[in-house]
């Protein structure tokens, strides 16, 4: 799942099929799938950046700063 979050258009194509069945209109389903997939991709990218940023801050702290 992590790999597919890096490719939002592919995720949108996959999501559009079940949404087509639910919504009954492929154009609306594809637009909704695009929106959902890009939001999921942005969330994943921000989570990764936040993890790298917090890890870098911990590594930069000296033992004196921790006390």
Image (cartoon, rainbow, N blue to C red):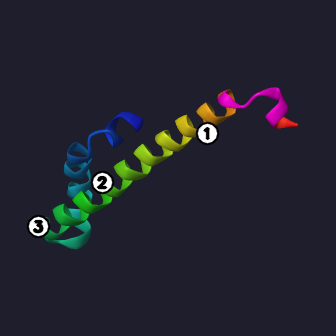
Q: Quadrant of residue 57?
A: top right
Residue under pointer 2: 37
Instruction: Give the structural element (helix, strand or loop) at label 2.
Output: helix
Residue under pointer 1: 54
Residue farthest right in this picture: 67
- Residue 44 percent location from the top left of the image: 43, 46
Residue 20, relative to residue 58: is it above or below?
A: below
Q: Main secondary structure of the magenta part?
A: helix
Q: CA distance from mark 1 to mark 2?
A: 26 Å
- Residue 37 percent location from the top left of the image: 30, 54
* 61 drawn magenta: yes
Q: Earlier in the sequence, mark 2 or mark 3?
A: 3
Q: Residue at x 21, y 55 (%)?
A: 17
Q: CA distance from mark 1 to mark 3?
A: 41 Å
Q: Residues within 10 Å of mark 3 (few under 14, many from 20)?
A: few
Horizontal side of 14 relative to 4 (left or right) equals left
Instruction: Give the structural element (helix, strand or loop) at label 1.
Output: helix
Q: Earlier in the sequence, mark 1 or mark 2?
A: 2
Residue 40, relative to residue 45: is it above or below?
A: below
* 22 drawn magenta: no
Residue under pointer 3: 27
- Which image quadrant: the N terminus? top left
Residue 30, relative to residue 5: is it above or below?
A: below
Q: Quadrant of residue 3?
A: top left
Instruction: Give the structural element (helix, strand or loop) at label 3.
Output: helix
């Amino acid at each position: 799942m992590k790999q597919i979050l890096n490719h939002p258009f592919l995720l949108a194509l996959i999501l559009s099929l079940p949404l087509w069945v639910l919504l009954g209109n492929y154009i609306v389903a594809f637009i909704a799938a695009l929106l959902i997939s890009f939001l999921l991709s942005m969330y994943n990218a921000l989570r990764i950046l936040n993890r790298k940023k917090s890890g870098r801050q911990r590594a930069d702290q000296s033992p004196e700063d921790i006390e």
